[in-house]
Image (cartoon, grey):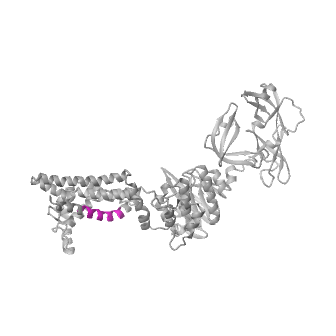
Amino acid sequence: MNWIPLILTLKLALVTTLVLFVLAIPLSYWLSITKSKIKPVIETLVSMPLVLPPTVLGFYLLLAFSPQNVFGAWLENWFGIRLVFSFTGLVLASCIYSLPFMVQPIQAGLSGISSSLTEAASLLGKNRLNTLFYILLPNIKSSIITAVVLTFAHTVGEFGVVLMIGGNIPGKTKVASIAVYDEVESLNYSLANQYSIVLIILSFITLFIVYMINGGHLKRFTR
Amino acid sequence: MNQVEGQISGIQSSDHMSLVFLDLGNGIEFQSILLDTQESAHYLQKGNRVNILFKETELVLSKEKEINISLENQILASITEIKKGEILTRIRLKTVIGDLVALISTTSSNNMSLKVKEPILAMVKFNEVILSPL
Amino acid sequence: MIELKLQKSLRSGDQEMLLDLDISIKKGEFVTFYGESGSGKTSTLRLISGLVEGDSGTIFVDNDCWWDMNAKINLKPAKRKIGYVFQDYALFPNMTAYENLEFALPKYQDKAIIDELIAIMDLKDILNLKPDMLSGGQKQRVALARALVSKPKILLLDEPLSALDNIMRLKLQDYLIKIHHKYHLTTILVSHDVGEIIKLSQKVFEFQKGKIIRSGNPKEIFTHGKTSAKFQFTGEVIEIFHEKVIGIISVLIGQDIVKVVCDLSELEEFKVGDKVMVGSKAFNPIIQKI
């Protein structure tokens, strides 16, 4: 078995999770406190990848990133970045695709915190950033772990978007899920089986962690 | 709690105490002793109307109408209802100042052989009478 | 001196209510806000602390303007030097009791105040415990101590004792009296407990539908200077017995239960949980040394 697609999958999932984690915290925080009228619009956009076929997302990203297009050309001319058929493109597409898995648990966790905690902190003279880092985030550890693990697992399981935007370039964009498809196409069933089993074990472990945490089995570690 | 209305007709005070004379109408006069003076309780003014309160258990009943006794407040009544319990008996009385209720022991009630419609003298000691401004 | 002249429309459920206040509270006074739930007591505390803003009016404290709608003045909550104890205590669950106190310490302020409060509030044994390991009374003490770390001039207490059992409640009342005097605070307490109000506060404001309907000395307000009876206590009905020709009502006064005999005709007026005044003439009770 060729390990490169599996390593690529893990690398993609890891980078996506990291990037999303950094992006999702301010976004989730904003969603949890805002009274703005555009909040439902943003929430809808964040949740869209849950219901859209991955191919639809992949298709539009492909169009947008393509160097024949205004946006894609601008990226290439100004930054020398080509997103189509590249690892960076995969990360970007994965981030959009897995966004709800990171944002929703964190947002739910933040909204579930009693408003009196935030108010108490503000009466004690703490600013919003202090309150976020010293009060809010430490009290939603299990939500954060759920979000991180789900995002990771979901990115591992990606197929449609990756195929559309990344193509099937070995060592660059050929992740494990694509490799399975590839091997089946070339009637290489035993290799497809090996990739699949590794993916099944990987998914089981990550999801198992989530349920352990939500079931309280890991509470003493997350506190 | 028995409750009737009356008017303050006179006040006799020492440093911390007052004896209040009360006119309950129809020629009935009551007295009440209080740990208050006109300074400590502003409602204590001659002519003011007050509620006069006393517990049912504080009423003393007598079949004799003329007794030389140190019970300051006395009123003639007629019995309208007798309700006997094992220990206590509840007696409803009709008077010129309104209906009253007396709680006496069943032994006393039996010894006195009280009956409905019988006339009776009801009495209450002046330290049992509570005033409440209207 | 806290001078509050403001209006704010409040919404509770589908009902709208106008909170319309004109009250002043003297420096060093211990006052209570009393009234049915939803009558605007907690909202008033939130307005004073700056957690919410009114629709119109002003808040002055010691002649400093804290809030003025027209002049667009709105002092930040943290700048108002207020200690606030929330109904749910609002202790930070991720921090130990000690860390909760430490977190409340303003920059560059001497830590001595923390040690002092630990001693006053008897927190020594629970410093390293997190809030969910603490009992209601302990949480309350930590919350009270935390509110005082920044040395506030004004202490706002939103029904802090309502969730506690009676013995704990009495103890905490003593703590409240102690700190009120020690730190020369102006204290505002929201409470439903008449006995507690009479014990703690010098003045009570009774709220009804967003307005103050009565204010004054608690004893006079609650017993209405009602009778000449000198032997008076307030308490709560805990049991009603129906004897053959009389009724007996048990009343909890502080930690003591007393029983009062009453006529059957009076029994219907009372139900368990009612706040009552028990009175007798000063001539009747006996007194003995124990």
| Residue A89 percent location from the top left of the image | 21, 65
The image quadrant of residue C207 is bottom right
Q: Residue at x 68, y 35 (%)?
A: C247
Magenta region, residue range? A12-27
Q: Is residue C16 visible?
A: yes
| Residue C167 percent location from the top left of the image | 61, 50
| Residue C219 percent location from the top left of the image | 69, 53
Majority SS type along the magenta span: helix
Would residue C41 appear left or right of B86 to someone viewing this image? left
Compare residues C237 and B10 and report the one nearer the observer: C237
Asked if residue C73 is positioned above or below residue B32 in the image, the reply reads below
Q: Is residue A14 magenta?
A: yes
Pick the quarter of the image with the C terminus of chain A: bottom left
Compare residues C271 and B8 and report the one nearer the observer: C271
Would residue A180 appear left or right of C263 to someone viewing this image? left
Would residue C258 appear left or right of A18 to someone viewing this image? right
